[in-house]
Amino acid sequence: MAETYRTFRKRLLAGEASCKSAVEAYLGRARKDSHLNAFLQLFDEAVENAERVDEKIKSGRAGKLAGLVLGVKDVIAVKGRRLTCGSKILENFESVYDATVIERLRDEDAIIIGKTNMDEFAMGSSTEYSGYGPVLNPVDTSRVPGGSSGGSAAAVAAELCHVALGTDTGGSIRQPASFCGVVGLKPTYGRVSRYGLVAFASSFDVIGPFANSVYDAALIMEVLSGHDGLDSTSAARPVPSYTALLDRDVKSFRVGVARESLGAGVADDVRHALETQIDELRAAGAEIKEVSMPHLDYTIPTYYVLATAEASSNLERYDGARYGHRSNEAEELEEMYVQSRTEGFGPEVKRRIMLGTFVLSAGYYDAYYRKAQRVRRLIKEDFDHAFKDVDAIITPTAPTTAFRIGEKTSDPIQMYLSDIFTVSANLAGIPGISVPVGKDSSSLPIGLQLLGRQFEEETILTIANHIEQSLKS
Ligand code: GLN
């Protein structure tokens, strides 16, 4: 079992550990495990930062996350550091400011040890579409770690950091968390500031944590969450004390099971794990109720119309003039745009830009984009309806466990289908968490997902914590 930040913190405050030695150990492991390709950059100055936090501990001034060793998905801005988004087009681009989440974590004395690998511009479900090579799943290196935050998931699973930040536009925190056997939380849209997060699909994107325990995820959420004047979509609601609420009894909760989520495409071992946990929750006193998600079949097409449309607009800015790679081959301005983008972007990003431009083009806008907006509304209404009867919904996080490297790259539709249970939360803006619940017959981790009402992260964290604790005993 990996050491959680919670346990490390106890040792730290008891004087049995130091931030410096922890950071050195994590950096050492990250270098030794470089074949996993989880990190794109490691920060040597983390050791000095750790020394500073050790001093603060001695003088009793240390923050809430003192000595928390953190990995950051390379789509989040860290001042003075390369910000590649897993893309060759931004290979030499350096951020001139810190994202709000980075500032908040640093203010509480978390120590950033590096930037993690990812699918290019967060488009993918396997981290095979990184411009810097695929990430390997530490549990079985012939398998993908999931994606697009595969580097963050792998780093936490392999104990290369305590916690890592990821982003979730359609499942990119929850699906890799399930493939690597760690906890991954996608907050409510607007719960966490996106200032300093490079946009993929702005009405879906959200930053959240990977951790080795539900408690660690809850703790870091207390620091990440809250209003930010620099992000007008961030919510001004108060932030609950998630950790203080974790040990509530699950008796008071009604948990929904969607008939549709047990259907075709779900691997037997995954279905079995879900049924086992439903029985366990029932035995613990939770009320289990059937709910319906009649529009589940439409979530993938709706997401891939809307997310590509937003991506095609957001990625317009990479034109060779303002940011990143500029081609040397071009003689005229328009040619410079085309050549720079042709050379800089990888195949999946090009596919998304073309799809997105198509669904937004005159003549197709109504048939695709507008219609998808309407279906998005229906999916949101499915959840509003279900959440009148239940406090949370439990599903598999992904239909299968980690697939083999190369298995799905030639068939984009198959790749997109691995997001079937995750994208609906992004369409509806609700929070979701993936919690590990054991292994399948090939010893690969299985994750279950809990979905909650908007701004009720505390409910899904509490139920996830119950599941985690019940598996320990
Ligand atoms: N796999 C989904 C996609 O490729 C989700 C990605 C994400 O959440 N960033 O778009």
Image (cartoon, grey):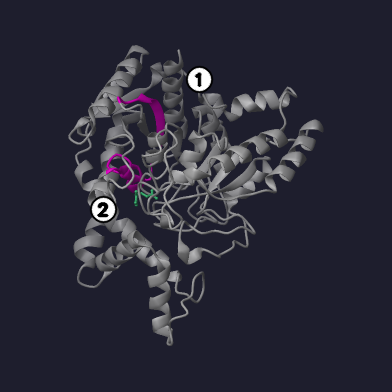
The residue most toward the bottom is 332
Residue in view at x 51 percent, y 59 percent: 84
The foreground one among 206 and 87 is: 87
* Whole-percent x, y for residue 5 in the image: 60, 30
Residue range in magenta is 418-441
Q: Is residue 431 visible?
A: no
Tell me the residue that label 2 is attached to: 412
Image position of 14 with respect to 229: above or below: above
Quarter placement of the C terminus: top left
* Whole-percent x, y for residue 112 in the image: 62, 45
Q: Residues within 10 Å of mark 2 (few under 14, many from 20)?
A: few
The foreground one among 268 and 21 is: 21
- What's under tag 2, amino acid-wise? Pro
Tell me the residue that label 1 is attached to: 247
- Residue 85 lies left or right of residue 28; in this view the side is left
Q: Which label sits on residue 47? A: none
Residue in view at x 46 percent, y 63 percent: 88
Q: Is mark 1 within 8 Å of ligand 1?
A: no
- Residue 341 lies left or right of residue 300; in this view the side is right
